[in-house]
Amino acid sequence: MAQVGYQSDPLKKRLSKKQFIELHLKQGVSQTEIARRFNVSISSLIRLKKQYDIPTNKNIKKLQAQQRDKVSLENQTIPEEIKRLYWNDNLSLAEIGKRFNVDRTVVFGYMKRHNIQIRNKSQARKLAANEGRLSMDLYEINDKFFSRWSAKMAWVLGYIFADGNIHPQAQGTYCLSISSKDTSLLQNIKKAMKSTHPIKKVIHKEWFVYRLFITRPQINSDLSKLGLIPRKSLIILFPKVPQRFLSHFIRGVFDGDGSVFFDPRSKKSPLRVSFSSGSKAFMTALETKLHMHAGLSKKTIYEAHRVNTSYYIRYSHKDCLKFFNYIYEDADESIRLERKYQKCIVGRNGI
């Protein structure tokens, strides 16, 4: 035992625990190479590793994978949704990973931990062979919905620019997801697009949301031409919308990222409307359009500093009345969020 102490103590003075972790776990230097650099035997290095209670590379990688998994998936989804995407929607591990911006190994670990069955090799090969047919023909939809401007198209596009996302998938394809807490709004979008895609409810511990997923090359191509891109929140630009459809587009944006409320500090004119966006360029263009085409007052664009910086504009009572007249003209219940519309009516009538 005295011999062990004699061998390890000098090494301990030359190689601290912090240095050991930096070399072996962070830089990936092998134990053999570390032993050579410090002119000691492998056994001496292993004994020092045990004294420092440093985990093996295998355990470290497993721990890091679990930590990435918890941060990246546990806070984004629930096992039922991953199971649905994998078995009902026939997405691969890689496709699910791209949807949540994680590696396929993270999805694999998540499924293992939550006891979600994984396809065997035969099932995976069969799915890969039929991938095009399964993803394209499972549901009906008007593939050319975004190819030509209309009131319905402009409204849906505005909502997608506010509350939609494009997720990269395998083989260069993309999936459009549209989320809302109002199933009636998603039903209106489905009817407008002549879609039979299902609306799925995703429940988390403290909140829930309904989602509509659409994967069609023609739709994704048209949306790309109109300026919709993956991870758009902070960089999205206001698209070129024909003036006759501008009010419908802005109503879609309002249904997604706008709000109507009453300021209790003002009894005579409490009505307020606001818009918010992570993109200052989009918000600047929106403010300009509302001033030029709806006659609203020029407004300052403010910054809100929370988790991420966002930008917002706010309109007072008189501007709100002009705004309602502008966006709801020629807009029936099939192309508007009814809940928000009724609140606007209450505010306009002064009830």
Image (cartoon, helix red, strand yellow):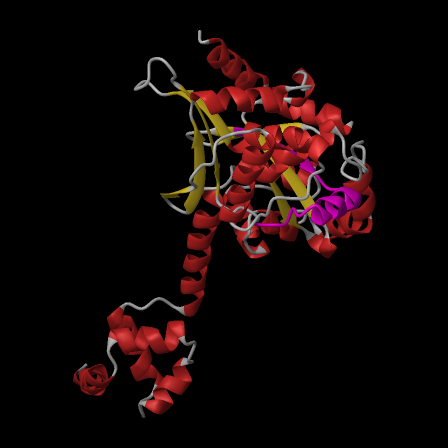
Residue at (32, 92) in percent of width and height: 39
Q: Would you say 62 lies left or right of 53 here?
A: right
Position above or below: 318 against 164 = above
Residue in the foreground of this view, choosing between 19 and 158: 158
Decide if residue 222 is in sight here: yes
Q: Point out residue 11 in the picture as x, y percentages from the top left corner.
A: 24, 85
Q: Would you say 179 lies left or right of 47 here?
A: right
Q: Residue furthest bottom?
A: 39
Extent of the magenta region: 209-231
Q: Residue furthest left?
A: 2
Residue at (58, 37) in percent of width and height: 289
Residue at (69, 28) in percent of width and height: 198
Residue at (62, 20) in percent of width and height: 328
Split into 4 quadrants, where in the image is the C terminus? Answer: top left
Q: What number of labels is visible? A: 0
Decide if residue 183 is in sight here: no
- Residue 222 sits inside the magenta stretch: yes
Q: Point out residue 35 in the picture as x, y percentages from the top left corner.
A: 35, 87
Split into 4 quadrants, where in the image is the N terminus? Answer: bottom left
Position above or below: 238 against 210 = below
Q: Point out residue 169 in the picture as x, y percentages from the top left corner.
A: 67, 51
Q: Point out residue 79 in the picture as x, y percentages from the top left corner.
A: 53, 38
Residue in the foreground of this view, choosing between 168 and 218: 218
- Residue 123 sits inside the magenta stretch: no
Q: Residue furthest top?
A: 351
